Amino acid sequence: MTPSQKTIVIIEVVLIVIGGILLVMPGKKVDLQPLWQEFEATNTEYNRLSVMSYRIVVQNMKPVQVKYNTIIEKFNSKKPVYNEIVVLVEQYKKDLKNLAELVDIYEPLLREYQESKGKLSQFINTNSALIEKSESLAGQVESSKSNFEMLNEKLQSASTLEELTFIKEKLASELGRINSLESLAENEASRIKAEEQAALAAKKKTTTPIVKKTVTPPKPVEIPVEKPKVEEPKGKTAPAKLMYKAMPDYPDNIKEMGFGGLVKIKVTVTADGRPKDPKIIRSSGNDRLDANSLRSSKECTFEPAYDNGQKIESEFIIEYEFKAY
């Protein structure tokens, strides 16, 4: 109940009380007409003021209602975005939880990887000299085989007894060199295998870590090979020909990690069939593979290019392709 309504009720109660008092008073005649007229006037004024108050309230409520509706519309328009934010926050919480679980799993794997990486680096550093010596020994064996094949071809085309005798002597010398190098390689491989088996047996018997010693193979015996002087027919013109292609090492760990590609190396072939000034014109993307290819290109042998019967220097491109697993 509003204050105005309370005032009207009080006035009505007062008039009723006064009317009742006057009615019960004996010997007196009371004229209630003025009071009733005053009450009606007061009631009319009250109704007029009530209508005015209502209109004022309605007028003032209109902008408030407009603002309220605007706020409701904005809220409704932003509600989907808010819902998306709530969903994203929940997903973010789940992702954080999953990430924490992955970190718990990944940390021991990372430590194990670091330990394995350290062991691998130590093994490579310890055995780098052995690997280089083994590669050199294998290269010499292949080179001797290539020279043996080339001398055998020359033997088939020899035209004089002196040439036959000279080539046969060189073949016998080269064959002896091949047998010597192969025997040396087999002995070295057997020795390394025996040491590895002994180290493995010792490791099983005790928990004390075994430090693998660096095994330095004996230096290969270099046997100078003199190429037979065979006169080439005059007027011959031909490019350089690759007679022996030394193959680079392709480590298993690099292959398993997926590193590979094509390496192209440009060399200058001298007049005596030797490569010089090797340059990488296309890289595989791996420094180790590029270095191995560059080293192997120096061990290749060529038949030099000819220009009108004269041996000349020329350029030749050697390609090595590494295919990963």
Image (tube, rainbow, N blue to C red):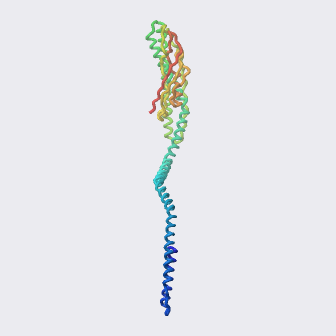
At x 49%, y 16%, the residue is: 240
The C terminus lies in quadrant: top left
**Where 303 falls versus 94 (above or below)?**
above
Between 72 and 131, the residue placed more toward the observer is 72
> Residue farthest to the bottom?
27
Where in the figure is residue 96, as x and y percent of width and height? 50, 50
> Residue farthest to the left?
156
Q: How many marks?
A: 0
Where in the figure is residue 283, as x and y percent of width and height? 51, 28
At x 52%, y 18%, the residue is: 315
Between 253 and 85, the residue placed more toward the observer is 85
**Where 291 falls versus 33 (above or below)?**
above
**Where 317 falls versus 7 (above or below)?**
above
Where in the figure is residue 292, as x and y percent of width and height? 52, 27
Between 237 and 37, the residue placed more toward the observer is 37
155 to the left or right of 208: left
Between 219 and 273, the residue placed more toward the observer is 273
The answer to which quarter of the image holds residue 277 is top right
At x 45%, y 11%, the residue is: 155
Where in the figure is residue 53, as x and y percent of width and height? 51, 69
